[in-house]
Amino acid sequence: MIKALLYLGTIIAALISIVWIRKRGNKSNTNSKWKVAVVIGPGGHAREMRDIMKSLPNRCSTLVYIVGNDKDVATERLIHQLSQSVETDVSINQQIYSLPVPKSHRESYTQAAIKGISSFIKSLNMLYTEQPDLIITNGPGIAVPICFAATVLNLIFRRNIKLIYIESMCRVEDLSFTGKLLYPVVHTLVVMWPHLSQKWPGVTYLGTIKTL
């Protein structure tokens, strides 16, 4: 039943994405700085995001860090490092949001569904308030309700939130479950292995994180 609902959600997201892409326009001033929301997951997700974000601060007016309420030492360390790296630039604002993680290993599907709905609603409220230009994520489960919420806002309120999903380097043979759910929703899906761009039409291969 849960899997059927997830597949149904993916189909709905795909339909929403089609409408969104047709309505989506380009940002009028490509030289202007953006408000960027970064979804930071625990463990390896945090370490990979550290490399991804090296070139971001000088392109941002605001950085919004979104973490799950299961954040670990690696996540907290990354946020601290990022905060220190941009705090000398008074023109860059920083915000931190913590959202419920949809599913942990110790929870039942019922508990996961309740937390997923809660996370989706809080994501809607947070994104409606912050109005980011861009959301970047690299695979933590918290990315799913955030990206779905952004897609709903793009459709209903005609927002222009661009979504970039960067698949983990560990995903060699196939996309992760999160990647498969977000595949029809995100504007750009980046993979680290060239054959994945052949297996999944429309995804982008730009090399490894070190060359992005």
Image (cartoon, helix red, strand yellow):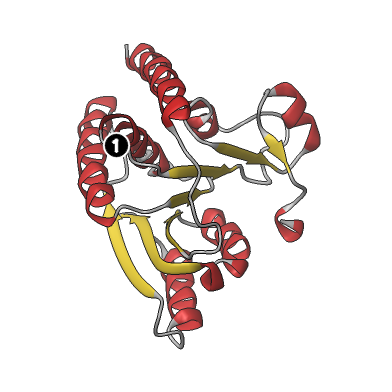
Query: Considering the image in quadrants, where does the C terminus appear?
Result: bottom right
Compared to residue 178, the image places residue 57 above or below, namely: below
Please tell me in which quadrant of the rendered image residue 56 appears: bottom right
Mark 1 Cα shell of 10 Å, populated few (<14), some (14-19), many (≥20): some
Provide residue 156's location: percent of width, then percent of height.
26, 30
Q: Residue at x 50, y 43 (%)?
A: 26
Q: Residue at x 46, y 83 (%)?
A: 84
Provide residue 5's location: percent of width, then percent of height.
33, 15
Q: Is residue 165 left or right of residue 91?
A: right
Please tell me in which quadrant of the rendered image residue 40 appears: bottom left
In what element is the residue under mark 1?
Answer: helix
Looking at the picture, tell me which residue is in the foreground, 86 or 32. Answer: 32
Q: Residue at x 46, y 88 (%)?
A: 88
Disc 1 marks a residue whose amino acid type is: Leu
Query: Considering the image in quadrants, where does the N terminus appear?
Result: top left
Q: Residue at x 26, y 38 (%)?
A: 120
Tell me the residue that label 1 is attached to: 153
Provide residue 174's location: percent of width, then percent of height.
67, 28
Q: How many marks?
A: 1
Residue most extreme to the bottom: 88
Q: Is residue 66 left or right of residue 53?
A: left
Provide residue 74's location: percent of width, then percent of height.
48, 66
Looking at the picture, tell me which residue is in the foreground, 146 or 116. Answer: 146
